[in-house]
Amino acid sequence: MFYLGLMSGTSMDAVDAALVRFQNHHLDLRQYRQFPFPARLADSLKAISPSTPVIEIARCDHELGDLFAECAIQLMNAAGIPQSEVAAIGCHGQTVLHCPQPEVRNSLQLGDPSRIAWRTGVRTVADFRRMDMAAGGQGAPLAPALHVWLLGGAGLDRVVLNIGGIANVTIIPSGSDREVTGFDVGPGNTLLDQWIRQHRREVHDRDGTWAAGGRCNGEVLDSMLADPYFPRQLPKSTGKEYFNLDWVARHAARAGVGPEPRDMQATLAELTCRTIAGAIFNYAPSTSEVLVCGGGVHNGYMMGRLRALLGKATVDSTARHGVDPDAVEAVTFAWLAKCRLDGVPGNLPSVTGASHPVILGAIYEPGKVKREK
């Protein structure tokens, strides 16, 4: 049976959709596509704040559910796979709130899974984070369990680095005497995307070209690197609630300088690379290989900086091991849907801080409906 994973990240530029089969630690990626995110809906989601009317949040939830369903239908049609051969859709949804602090400990993703199940005719699994949080965990990151299943057992100390909106690492030791660890390092692409969107009306800095032409501002960078999130003890996770343009403005003001926009882009790129390299040196100093996935793998400037900062460790794309770097996050939620149906825990307590392994996600049955064409 196939599983279909849907993922929408912080940039909201596309919905990632992957149709896969899993066999003996092997991934059969039958179809992967990125579907453009409607600009009006993205603007509505980005505008959500504590003062947003509940009816507006409900509207976004409704529209996102329909969008995810349409993406799933198009993907199945493109692959020529009928819904009867798809065991489940795993949908992460669009995060609008992630608060791992003990006094709140909640995470909210929009994209009504009932609408996905109804429109596609396929059982849908959603709400993957909150059972881990109920067990005392951070609810993130969740990809490390897949990273271990797919890229573990190499006989060397390996780090899987996902550079999405937030950068996170999975530290896979060579021996069984050490636990797998993982955490959100800090901003990956989110600040870079927000900054270039504000100043150049572009979705992202293609290949890091704009940053490469700027000069890193040392005063602002030092202020950012001193932020209390970076030395915080594990487990830890974060999101755009913490790392956003208001955060950038506060550190620029603290440093007493306002860099030219291109120089700030260079500074933000350096922040991402320095914090990633620092995290690997601190928590995995014997790392031999860093495998990169997520949108950041296409930023040639940052990949070059990471290779320079990490020295002897090999830095390469997960494609080197036959894993499409763009598809990994969507595949994660297809895999977590399979875990849910199999009754297998999907979290790693050594990563999230949960007290126990738990089964993640809620199941939404579709009833008898025909798939739309």
Image (cartoon, rainbow, N blue to C red):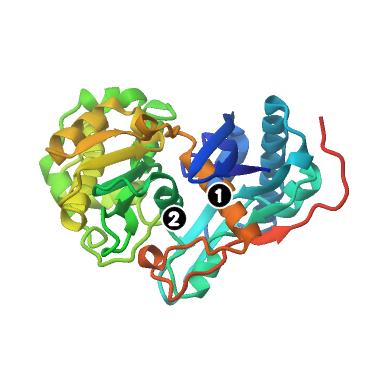
Location of the N terminus (image quadrant)? top right
Question: Residue 100 in the image: x percent, y percent?
Answer: 42, 67
Mark 2: secondary structure: helix
The residue nearer to you, when weighing 58 against 312, is: 312
In the picture, measured across the screen, residue 142 lies left or right of residue 235, that is: right
Question: Residue 269 in the image: x percent, y percent?
Answer: 25, 37
- Residue 145 - label: 2
In the picture, measured across the screen, residue 262 lies left or right of residue 42, that is: left
Is residue 3 shown above or below 302? below
Q: Is residue 259 visible from the viewing direction of this image? A: no
Residue type highlighted by circle 1:
Trp
In the picture, measured across the screen, residue 297 lies left or right of residue 365, that is: left
Instruction: Determine the image quadrant of residue 52.
Output: bottom right
Residue at 35% from the left image edge and 51% from the top image edge = 243
Is residue 230 shown above or below 273? below
In the picture, measured across the screen, residue 175 lies left or right of residue 7, that is: left
Instruction: Determine the image quadrant of residue 241.
Output: bottom left
Question: Pointer 1: what residue?
Answer: 335
- Residue 368 - label: none
The residue nearer to you, when weighing 158 against 97, is: 158
Mark 1 touches mark 2? (CB < 8 Å) = yes
Sequence-wise, which precedes: disc 1 or disc 2? 2
Location of the C terminus (image quadrant)? top right
The CA distance from mark 1 to mark 2 is 10 Å
